[in-house]
Image (cartoon, helix red, strand yellow):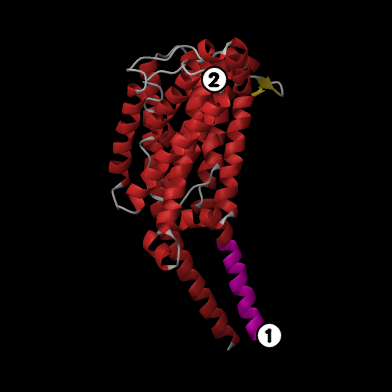
Amino acid sequence: MNCELCIEHCALKIHMGNYFKNVWNSKGVKQVVSVFVASIVLCIIFGIYNPNFLSKNNFIDVFRDMSPYVIVGIGQALVLITGNIDLSIGSVYGSSAMISALMMSKGGVNPYVSLLVSLIFGVAIGFVNGQLVSRFKLPPFIATLGTMFVGRGIAQFVNDSRPTSGIASGVGDEVANAFRKVFYTTTFSVFGTTILIALLVWALAYVFLSKTKYGRHVYAIGSNSDAARLSGVSVSKTTTTVYMISGFCAALAGVMSVAKVTMASPDGGNAMEMYAVAVAVIGGISTLGGIGILQGVIIGAFMWIVLEKGLILAGFDNSIKLMVIGIIVVLAVGLDIIMRKVGDRGRLNISKKDKKATNDASTTAG
């Protein structure tokens, strides 16, 4: 009996030690911490170069500007964890903004009704994406590339490829200002309502990913979709769900842009899908699927905006800013692939050590 307890105790110690190692390495925690530390270092460097960077007003702008990136990054992150990608985010962002702005400026529709219509539109596009990828087996790149062009076409069609008028022309100044204040007022000294909304979306997505059956299935599909299917996971339903969430997030960010500038442009959201990928990848979400935590999206968006504003305050033009950020994205993806290979080797070695330790314990007990 004592021998059996000894074997179980040894196996448990090995298992717990390996569990924390795996959490640190495989779920993206290490990269999240690394990116956060790098962001703080960048803040200090930019602050030394230009003290205005560390001012309260600048950080209000940082939190305000990172909010839409957090929201679209969450949607893209969920899709990436399943091993897919959503290239329609930017066009859903732009077309949702155009739809809501037109409803308010031309139709005088209540802003919250137009918000609801835009969100339904975004979810509908997400549903189509999910069905094309999961049910009709189209490659996600091709499926969402197609809906990207459809969404951009809708954004141009609804108002003859012209920007909308100001929303106040339809709903009146008082209603327009009240709608804007919902998204763009400052609370708690440096935190604006936009970042609070983004954090609320993050919290809901976190609960979905970590506390629900479908959330656990998201990781399972990204790790091995065939094994997940054999285990009883509804790959089609789960994949469609994450694409619908991505469409919702893109539409919400688009309407937030209308509240910010009180109008919309058919070119709104251009390249937003790539920004969403960048924010997610910088935050440790694997492009290969199955790995990543949503905290990384917040840190990735923060680092993105810190780089943007820091380079601008340092006097670099937009071309340099884009090149620097592009290099960082490539490095992040490359690091992700390298760490995945190292992690796979590490888990293989750990498995061999576990087996050897258990065998040794059995031999000693015998």
Q: Residues within 10 Å of mark 1 (few under 14, many from 20)?
A: few
- Quadrant showing the N terminus: bottom right
- Quadrant showing the C terminus: bottom right
Residue at (49% x, 75% y) in the render: 356
> What segment is highlighted magenta in the picture?
3-18
Residue at (40% x, 18% y) in the render: 265
Instruction: Pick the residue in front: 335 or 89.
Output: 89
Tell whether position 15 is magenta: yes
Disc 1 residue type (three-letter) = Asn
* Label at residue 212: none
* Label at residue 259: 2
Instruction: Pick the residue in front: 93 or 307.
Output: 93
Which percent across, then down, holds residue 257?
Answer: 50, 22
Residue corresponding to mark 1: 2
Instruction: Pick the residue in front: 26 or 293.
Output: 293
Determine whether, in the image, residue 192 is placed left or right of residue 244: right
Which percent across, then down, holds residue 14?
Answer: 58, 68
Q: At numbered mark 2, what does the secondary structure look like: helix, strand or loop?
A: helix
Disc 2 residue type (three-letter) = Ala
Residue at (60% x, 28% y) in the render: 195
In this picture, is 194 found above or below 335?
Answer: above
**Residue 100 at least partly seen:** yes
